[in-house]
Image (tube, coloured by chain):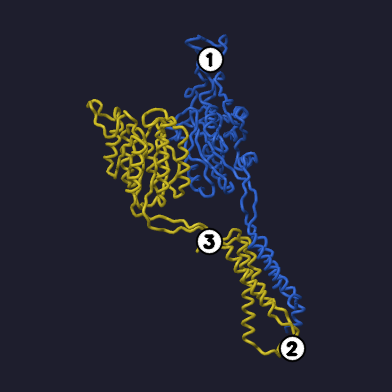
Chain colours: A yellow, B blue
Amino acid sequence: MNLAVNTPLALAGLLLALLPLFNNGIRTSPAPWTALIPADTLSVVIVGCLRLCAVAAIAGLVLGIAGLHRTEQSRERIGHGAHIVLLLDRSSSMDNTFAGRTANGSDESKATAARRLLTDFVKQRQTDLIGVAEYSTSPLFVMPLTENKNAVQAAIAATATPALGFTHVSKGLGMAISFFEQQPVTGSRIVLLVSDGAAAIDHDSEQKLRLWFKQQQVRLYWIFLRTANSPGIFDQPEDSRDDNAGAMPERYLHKFFLGLGSPYQAYEAESPDALQQAIADINQLENLPMHYVERVPKQDLSAVCYSVAAFLLLVLLGAKFCEVKR
Amino acid sequence: MEPLKDYRTLCLLSALIAMMVLFLYPSKQQKTPTYNYTFIVDITRSMNATDYQQDNQAVSRLNFVKQTLRELLQKLPCESKVGLGLFTERRSTLLFEPLEVCSAYTEINIAISKIDWRMAWAADSNIAKGLLSTLEMLQKSDSTVIFITDGQEAPPVNPNYQTDFSVLTAPAKGMIIGVGGLQAVPIPKFDSQGQQTGFYSHDDVPHRSSFGQSNLDPSQVKGYNARNAPFGSEAATGNEHLTALHETYLEKLGAESGLSYARLTDLKNLSQALQNPKLATEKVVQTDIRWQPALLALLLLSLVYLPRPYKSRRFFWK
């Protein structure tokens, strides 16, 4: 019960609640000598009660005016879910279709398909904390880990704007992992990488990423949106001379991820349907028990204050009509 | 009726009537201005120039913009919306679409604080083209574009290739906010680790555009050759390695694109500029007016229990 008021200054009005202690508010009748009237416990009790009613009524009105409310509460609960960072590729090729052509009316672009399916995915993950990072030539911090699904949807919707530059995946991964710093380790921590291409990662970055993945206990899902006739992540080189990160960055990025030592799963999606399948899989897999914080919104109590005050006013008014004039 | 002759009864009765009014008409409809802004923040290198002062410390233009926007966020009325985008090269990108400020305050606040010049995906700073592409990109959105920049074009624009804002079909709604001081200051230079390694020097930057057709008068250019050296043989000199707020240029861009212009000096002047009624939409919101009848009831009730003058008390009580 954390109570608070909107306008603390109005609480000064509580001083008015002391008034009934000095004046019982009952009409007086002249009597020759009050000492003649015998002491009556019942009268004392009734007068005391009426005073109390008046004090409470005044206090109720003042608290109502001050805007008494219960502050937003957070309750810790245990549910199923995950902390997910969506790492989205904003490189220019994402604006092409799965067939590698410019998107037209009949075929949607890879970015559009990803946006549509991610929107659905976020809708289904009610208890998760979700953050959004993007990368092209450089990483973009978009939305911190949050339970506010509207914010996540707004960030996903904003990827409808034209894509940017090249694919610099290592910096993007670094930024995605940084989301988990200063976050409690509970449930699973996931980086969901959605990209349509890969890039060679330099040795320094490889070392750092290995360390960070281990430190932050992050699981990685890579949804690779494969364009027709482009190399895939599971392709074997036909010529051993092509077996290097420069010629086959997808294969080598996959190899690097496999060697991370943390749980990793790759999906190669060649169509929107395959992408949907991949997302459905993740939706099912990532439901470890997790502590999460449920927000109980601010609760206005001034209505209660006013109702109590009104009821007490009615009682006081009723008492008035019981007074007898002699 | 006997009790009605007592002023206290009348007071209590009126107070009760006031309470009935309170429950019957708890709120009234009121028009309040709300805003829908999409802030597009310039993150090019010149925004790292430190020509703002905060707590007696020099801060960079970008940091000052971030700080001011975060403070502005607290001032915006609920139901207002804020979106965020970044500008570099010759276009901008949208990080998120406008979000309601009260419910998503933390998220917007963190996102603004995380803006970094290193998010730039390319290094040019072609503001006129960036502004045009931003306006085209957000043409369908009902959000007001607030383009925050220092007006430093890098490389400088060739006057033969000026951006034509007439392609905009609908009149743009928004504002250009000029950032920076009017005195030219050096632009900090950083290494790949993000450490400052000094400032950009005269030789680090192009001082004129050498793209396309020359805008120079051939007879005045030394070493002019129409095919091989249309800009002459002499190295261009200039002060492009220093940066100052190009106010006249931004005002010109504003006039061409239909946006108004204001300069950022502090939070007060920014919020004043942004609270332009032209940018606001009147929204009908329910305002709580229960305090009015409640206050009346409170006064009436207090009247009942007001201490009696001493004289009458002595007469009746003792």
Return the x and y of residue A177 as percentages of the image width and height: 37, 43
Q: Give the alpha-carbon distance from disc 3 to disc 1, as whole Å.
A: 70 Å
* Nearest the eye: A251 or A138: A251
Chain letter behind tag 3:
A
Which residue position holds label 2? A33
Q: Amino acid at mark 2?
A: Trp
Return the x and y of residue A156 as percentages of the image width and height: 45, 41
Which residue position holds label 3? A70
Query: Which residue sits furthest front?
Result: A106
Q: Quadrant of the C terminus of chain B?
A: bottom right
Q: Amino acid at mark 3?
A: Arg
Q: Give the alpha-carbon distance from disc 2 to disc 3, as whole Å.
A: 52 Å
Residue A198 visible, this orientation:
no
Q: Amino acid at mark 1?
A: Ser
Q: Are marks 3 and 1 in contact (CB under 8 Å)?
A: no
Picture quarter containing residue B139? top right
Picture quarter containing residue A108? top left
Which residue position holds label 1? B214
Sort mark 1 into few (<14), some (14-19) or many (20+) by Cα contacts within 10 Å. some
Return the x and y of residue A206 as percentages of the image width and height: 31, 37
Chain letter behind tag 2:
A
Element assignment for label 1: loop
Element assignment for label 2: loop
Picture quarter containing residue B217? top right
